[in-house]
Image: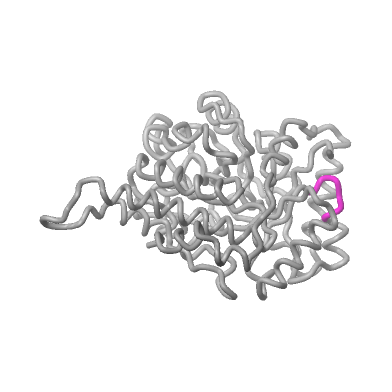
Amino acid sequence: MTEHAPLILDVAGTTLSADDRRRLVHPLTGGVILFARNWENRAQLLQLTSSIKAVRDDLLICVDHEGGRVQRFRTDGFTHLPPMRALGAMWMDDGKGAKAVPGSGALRATNAATAAGYVLGAELRACGVDFSFTPVLDLDWGESGVIGDRSFHRDPRVVALLAKSLMHGLLQAGMANCGKHFPGHGFVKADSHTEVPVDKRSLKAILADDAAPYPWLSSTLTSVMPAHVIYPKVDSRPAGFSQRWLQDILRREMRFDGAIFSDDLSMEGARRLDGQVVSYADAAVAALQAGCDLVLLCNQSVGDGKAVDELIEGLSEARKQGSWQPSVDSESRRLALLPETLPQAWDELMYQPAYLQALDLLP
């Protein structure tokens, strides 16, 4: 076991280059995040994931694969999963007139959520992907374009129960989960990919509403991703760089003991700390110091990949200088996200009764 491998990096294309291999073998690299550009078909994806594991079998192969508009692989047999809002709508639909049965929509929706989690996890695992950054726990306030129909519902109770059902399906497929974006990204209009969103509500208001699913799911969540959003009445830094949010609230008050991922360090919401533009390495150190176990840098391997190399070199230097110390606990949390079971081969999965039933339950 490496002492601590906190970096989740991407790769440029559909096969590994010499530069990709050099970066993946580095002891600070803990995983890979895949994108649509890494996809041609299932055979190619399985070859790519196999080649990543051949470099190091402990690398965590990740993807943003939620359903709806955030689904990286959509062809060659992959099921088009519904946006999570469709499950929330199903929850609210108890039928009409004499055939209406109170609560029947909620029961159908929880079954459908479990089916969605199982289909999502089983199909990815059949292609060698270990982990998906799902489910979204943000509330559907109707304000955020970047969240929008990725959210289950406006009611945190409905969000928590549908998310728990989806996570049950992931678990059936042998896949861990990631609740995002703590403590909530749904209230702000700004997109943290391109701006630094600010949510001016009080801590009491946020905990009572947007953040409510996190303590309710603390025994089920295996990882959490904080938002690149500033909540100035709590901390001047975005949540992913805030000891107050990550250590005091999430760890101590909510008693969460799983892995904490930073969101993408190349997003605008991660580039400015304390009013200053920071390097990727400085952002990574700040996130790790605040309480993140793992940090993501996405879409920077394309071209010369200079930013990826600068991040690896910068974090190595920070370790030498003592501004960042590796954590055995963080490494244990990373390794705990790796699947413990063998995946089912795609051709076998297509005839499995549980998979076929799950497909029938999807909205």
Residue at position x 64%, y 44% in the image: 261
Query: Which quarter of the rendered picture does the C terminus lie within?
Result: bottom left
Residues drawn in magenta: 24-29
Q: Residue furthest top?
A: 252
Residue 57 in the figure: left or right of residue 298: right
Chief SS of the magenta region: loop
The x and y percentages for residue 25 are: 86, 53
Which quarter of the rendered picture does the N terminus lie within?
top right
Location of residue 287 with respect to 304 vertically, above or below: above
Question: Which residue occupies 32% across, 48% down?
Answer: 107
* Residue 294 in picture, x, y percent from top left: 69, 43
Is 236 situated above or below 18?
above
Q: Is residue 51 left or right of residue 123?
A: right
- In terms of image quadrants, where is residue 205? top left
Instruction: Look at the image and say whether residue 36 sits in the magenta stretch.
Output: no
Query: Is 15 left, or right, of 80 in this rendering?
Result: right
Q: Picture coordinates of residue 218 (x, y %)?
A: 51, 33
- Within the image, what quadrant is residue 161 found in? top left
Q: Quadrant of residue 158?
A: top left
